[in-house]
Amino acid sequence: MLRVAVVGSGPSGVYAAQTLVQQREVPGVRVDVLDRLPAPYGLVRYGVAPDHEKIKSLQGSLRTVLEDERIRFLGNVEVGGERLSTGRLLELYHAVVYCVGAARDRMLGIPGEELIGVHSATAFVSWYSGHPDAAAEVFDLPGVDSAVVVGAGNVAVDVTRILARGTAELAPTDMPQPALGALADSGVRRVAMVARRGPSQGRFTTKELRELGTLPGVDVGTDPAELALDPVYADPVAAAALPAVARRNLEVLRGWAGPGPGDAPRRIALRFYLRPMEILGGPDGRVTGMRFERTAPDGSGGVTGTGVHEDIDAQLVLRSVGYRGVPLAGLPFDSGRGTVPHAAGRVLRAGRASVGEYVAGWIKRGPTGVIGTNRPCAKETVSSLLQDAGALARRDLPGDPLDALRAAGLRPVRWPGWLAIEAAEADLGRSLGRRSVKIPDWQGLLGAAGPL
C-alpha cells in the first residue's frame, strides 16, 4: 500500500488527493491531507468573498473528496516547524505532495507603505473571511471616507465591492460578526480602484466586473479620457483581436464612461494609466492619500511615465498587485519566481529530482489561473508520483503517521472535529439571527473541534 501525505487542503491539495485515490495504475493508495488550519478548503473558505455563494459552493465537491474512506483529513498540523520537519514527514510517508499556495502579497515598493491605514488586500480578505491568523487585524472603517484599491484583478474587484456593499447584502453570508459590524459602521463613501495599465489589460473577469454595477446605492464610473488612452478602445479591428474576456470588459467599462448620476450614497471610480509613486500621510502617521504618475502606452504592451502626477485622497489604501509563494523550511525555493523548483511536479534539489517530494498548485506554477486550473496541475504531479511508485513503495514505514504526529506534540483535528466546528458555526449563526457564521479565531476553532 502506498501512503501519501498531501500538505494543504485547498483545491490543488484536494484535487491531488482525489486523483491519487481514483487512479487505477497503483491500487491501494491511502492519502492523509494535512493542513496548518483546523478547517479545510483553503482559499475556497478563506479567500473567496463571502457574497460569492456560487463559488463558495465548491466546498461541497471538495467535501465529497475529503469524506472518501481512502482519504484522511488532519488539520491543525504545521509542516516545517519544530515539531514536524519536511524530512520527518517524508520518513512517515512514501511520498509528500506540497500544495501550500502563495501566502504572501507583493509590496508596491514605494514610500509610505508603513503608514497607518495601508494594508494588503490579502489581509483585508483574510479579515472579512474569518481567517484565524487575521483575528487581530484592525481596519478603522468608521474613520474612512475615501479608499484606494491598487490593482486590476479579481481580488481588487472583490475588496472594492465589499467596501461599497451595504450590510443588508452581507448579513446573509458567513462573514464573521466582528467584520460585519465594522463594515456596518463604515464611513466609506468613495472607492477608487486604480490600475497602472489600460482597461484592455485588466486581469479581472467580466462577471466580477459587472457585479460592481449591480450594487444597490452605488454609482460606478470610468474616465472617458483614460479609456481613450488605450490603443484598442476606439479601434474595432484591434478590439476584435483581443481575448473574449478583454472585449467584454471594454464594453462594460464603456457603459460606465462619464461622471455618472452622482446621487447615490457611495461611488466607485475605476481609474487607469496611473502608476503608484508615493503614499501620503499626515503628522499622526496615518495615510491621507496616494500620489500617482500618469502613464501612457509604450507601443509594446507596457506603459511609460509621462511626468504628470495626480493625488487621490484616501484614509485607507489596499494593495492588490499579486501574490508570492513563501519558503517552507526544508524545501528548496526559487526566490525569483516564488516557487519550489520542480520538473513536472517533482521537487528538484540541486537540479535533481528528490524521490518522494512533489508540488502542485501555486507553489508549483506561481499564482496563475483560476480554481479549475488546479485540476490539470495536480494531475500532472500525480502522474509523476505514480511513475515513481515502484521505487517509493520499497521503503518500509514506521506505522500509522497519526501516532507519530501525536507523539511529536501535535493535536490533529480529524474530520469529526471539523464537523463539530461546522455545527458550532451553525449554532453561532442561529444565535445571531443569521445563517452559519464563521468562528474567526484559533481558540474558538480549536475549542469547537472538541477533544483532540
Image (cartoon, rainbow, N blue to C red):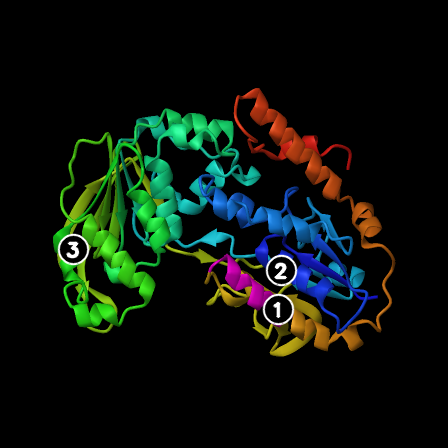
- Quarter of the view holding residue 360: bottom right
The residue at 80%/46% (across/down) is: 406
Helix, strand or loop for disc 1: helix
Please say if the residues under marks 2 and 1 sit with CB atoms less than 8 Å apart.
yes
Helix, strand or loop for disc 2: helix
Q: Which residues are magenta?
A: 370-381
Q: Nearer the viewer, mark 2 or mark 3?
A: 2
Total residue callouts: 3
Residue annotated with mark 1: 379
Q: Quadrant of the C terminus?
A: top right
Report x, y in % for residue 82: 70, 50
Q: Which amino acid type is marked by label 3?
A: Glu
* Residue 233 appearing in the image: yes
Residue annotated with mark 3: 226
Q: Which amino acid type is marked by label 2?
A: Tyr
Q: Residues within 10 Å of mark 3 (few under 14, many from 20)?
A: many
- Residue 15 circle label: 2
